[in-house]
Amino acid sequence: MKGTAVTAPDPVPRVIDRGDAWSSVPPASHAASRRGRRLGTAIAAGCLAVLLGGCSFADRLIEDEVEEPTIEGFYELPDDVASGDPGTLVRSQEIVGAPDDARAWRVIYHTTDQAGDPVLSSGLVVAPTGSAPDGGRPVVGWGHPTTGTAPDCAPSRWIDPFLLMEGLGDLLDRGFVVAATDYVGGGVDGPNSYLVGATAATAVLDAVRAAQHLPETDAGDDLVTWGHSQGGQAALFAASAASSYAPELEVHGVAVAAPAANLPKLIDAHLDDISGVTIGAYAFAAYAEVYGPTTPGATLESILSPAGVAAVPAMNDLCLATQSTELHDLARPLVGGFMTADPAATEPWATLLAENVPDAVPADLPVFVAQGLADELIDPAETKAYADGLAANGNAVEYVEYPDIDHGAIGYRAVPRLLEWIDALAVPGALN
């Protein structure tokens, strides 16, 4: 019912995997080389595939041997890349070993940052094969959870680049094209955009446009945004920005799992633990780079201890998805001595964090929110409060709780209910 948050506890909670405290990928090899990072992610992919009841790990290793010589070169761009409209392609590369009955591409595309300046982003596009409906296929704009901020951490560079695309197979079966951004600064060099909501929004929306520029996808204008954790923030910002930034797209709904929807509360809750150091290292580096030139006081030195400032570059060079042990080895000695003040109560950080809390999405948009009650990163009470706020705004909200599910597993665990919700949207061109 519109304007009501419908809470629907799942009757059969099941832990898929606990993994890292706030990553969807189980801990893996932590070799420092680029090849080691990719192999570490492959091991993680294999583990997760087994947990989810299917394993193409060996196939992906074989396919990676074919692809690897071309992958690194794909992301190496000349300094004088021609300008282009947001969403237009710089280059694309079809991926060996796409999901069954689908084709997939790595893409680099034009987008804009929070100031409206042109930047590049990369990502993945996956599309069903076969005939498309009149009007084109509907699209899911996917925002992945935190993997890291270095270019090597981008999912599109992984041996199994489809690993974090939660619900991918079922969405393809329903006729959706899935457009998955790496975010600006991931995959291809660019400004660090970690938890910068406006830049995340344009990256998501322009990935959808990039999919439309691949004629083989037959991607249309009908869109659902879907994201987990960091990607939940991106999906919400994209849904809010679409009418002004990409008015040709018809957004039918937004779905999120354990979204990073209240950054001041998130940072405040983890001031003195390892998650706070890790999130802070990523977020403060991004905010200092993005906002520092125009915001007095937005420097690392204004909020972090000297030891924290010294550690941030090395931490940002490590990928949470595949190097969490190394990352946490750097973070652990800083617990209790990383920040010199509470950023949620210290300017300019309090204002910057508040600016990156997603606004209420348009009241006519249905919203799906999933939250695990065993989540130790995102406070379930905060997610429930955010869902209630959307309902008060007039949105039709379906809020689903999973009693024994943690932060890493919630995206996968929510997929069956997510699909029911998407089916009920009756998105033009989708197959139920």
Image (cartoon, grey):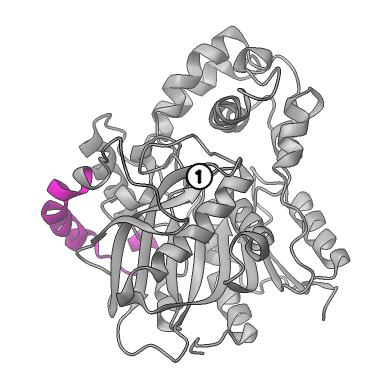
Q: Does the magenta stretch include residue 58?
A: yes
Q: As drawn, is 108 to the left or to the right of 264?
A: left
In front of the other: 272 or 51: 272
Q: What is the x, y in percent for residue 74?
A: 23, 48
Is the residue 132 above or below the residue 406 in the image?
below
Q: In the image, what residue occupies the spot 51% across and 52% down?
A: 203
> Hey, which quadrant is residue 92 in on the image?
bottom left
Q: What stretch is highlighted in magenta?
A: 49-72
Q: As drawn, is 2 to the left or to the right of 132?
A: right
Q: What is the x, y in percent for residue 197?
A: 63, 46
Q: What is the x, y in percent for residue 414?
A: 58, 67
Magenta span: chief secondary structure: helix
> Hey, which quadrant is residue 218 in on the image?
bottom left
Q: In the image, what residue occupies the spot 53% across and 16% down?
A: 333
Q: Can residue 15 be seen in this view?
A: no
Q: Is residue 429 magenta?
A: no
Tell me the kind of residue under disc 1: Thr
Q: What element carries label 1?
A: loop
Q: Quadrant of the N terminus?
A: bottom right
Q: In the image, what residue occupies the spot 44% across and 84% down?
A: 136
In front of the other: 340 or 223: 223
In front of the other: 282 or 7: 282
Circle 1 residue: 146
> Hey, which quadrant is residue 10 in on the image?
bottom right
Is the residue 9 above or below the residue 131 in the image?
above
Residue at the extreme top:
306
In front of the other: 19 or 40: 40
Q: What is the x, y in percent for residue 223?
A: 55, 73
Q: In the image, what residue occupies the spot 41% across and 63% down?
A: 210
